[in-house]
Amino acid sequence: MNIIRSLSEMKKWSQSLRKAGRTIGFIPTMGALHEGHLSLVAQARSQADATVMSIFVNPIQFGPAEDFRRYPRPLEADCAKAAGAGCDVVFVPQKSDMYPERYCTFVTVEDLSGRLCGASRPAHFRGVATVVLKLFNIVTPDIACFGQKDAQQVIVLRRMAEDLNVPVTIKVCPTVREADGLAMSSRNAYLTPAERAAAPVIYKGLQAARALYDKGERKAVRLSQIIEEHYRTAPLIKKEYIEIVDTISLHPLAAVASTALVAAACRTEESKTRLIDTIVLGGSL
Ligand code: PAF
């Protein structure tokens, strides 16, 4: 496996691969890799000739009071995991190359970026869309794989790729979970033992909503209510939002007529960790 740090070298590698008629699968990450990331590698490998993973903790998607500085950066262990999963390249760009002095171009996906997580993280999706477009331009992938847990991210990036005519297919892969149902996330490492023990309630609430939906309930208010009831039983887990929205526009739905995204965000009481999880009812993303 190659570790490439320079933007020009990464571009050269991709160009030579494309010249040879081979396709590229891409997994953009911020490192601190877990099984969820490795499942994206497996997906990319099954659909493309070569697999590139980027590892870059993107400063512009973090708010001023967020965890950019303390975000875990176990680069050596990450490279070993990426190699074990069969990546051909790990691309590790430097901050000074991605955002040199005088950098001032940003991508804003209007409307979608202000909804759900965007309400409390106002610059987050602008930072995500900007870095992912830059990475797409450098790596030139045919497909790019993202996890369903970050459903809003996928929906924002699909819109960005479509609106800006980026020739990439965005694949959504199922959320990988711990044995007790907690969605895998690099941020789970911040949880105190008591928060970790309580955190599975986030998915349990979503599963209860699915069970109610399977019994025929379609009213969004009833489905949200049952999730909220679960969250109220866990004092260490504070709800930020529970929303039932359209999977393309992210507009709230009064009732689930076809496909709906059920999204929840919580903040833990002790370590102040923000955890999100999602399910899709009546279809897929
Ligand atoms: O999901 C993430 O890890 C990040 O938001 C991404 C897509 C790598 C952009 O920095």
Image (cartoon, grey):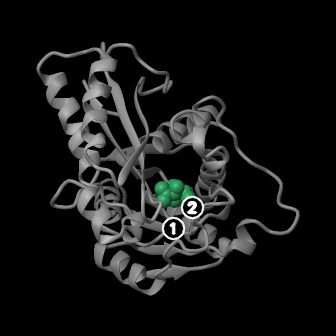
Q: Determine crowd level at label 2: few under 14, some 14-19, many 20+ residues with C-alpha closer than 10 A.
A: many
Residue 115 x, y percent position in the rendering: 55, 33
Q: Quadrant of the C terminus?
A: top left
SS class, disc 2:
helix
Residue located beneath label 1 in the image = 54
Spatial CA span between label 2 and label 1: 9 Å
> Which mark is in front, 2 or 1?
1
Examine the rendering and report whether any part of residue 35 can be seen: no
Mark closest to the chain's N terminus, 2 or 1: 1
Looking at the rendered structure, the kind of residue marked 1 is Ser
Rendered image quadrant of residue 97: bottom right
Relative to 260, does residue 101 appear above or below in the rendering? below
Relative to 4, does residue 177 appear above or below in the rendering? above
Residue located beneath label 2 in the image = 139
SS class, disc 1:
strand
Q: Are marks 2 and 1 in contact (CB under 8 Å)?
A: yes
Residue found at x 25% / y 15%: 218
Q: Is mark 1 within 8 Å of ligand 1?
A: yes
Q: How many marks?
A: 2
Looking at the rendered structure, the kind of residue marked 2 is Val
Residue 40 x, y percent position in the rendering: 34, 58
Examine the rendering and report whether any part of residue 74 can be seen: yes
Residue 196 x, y percent position in the rendering: 29, 64
**Most extreme residue toward the right, as rendered?**
102
Q: Determine crowd level at label 1: few under 14, some 14-19, many 20+ residues with C-alpha closer than 10 A.
A: many
Rendered image quadrant of residue 44: bottom left
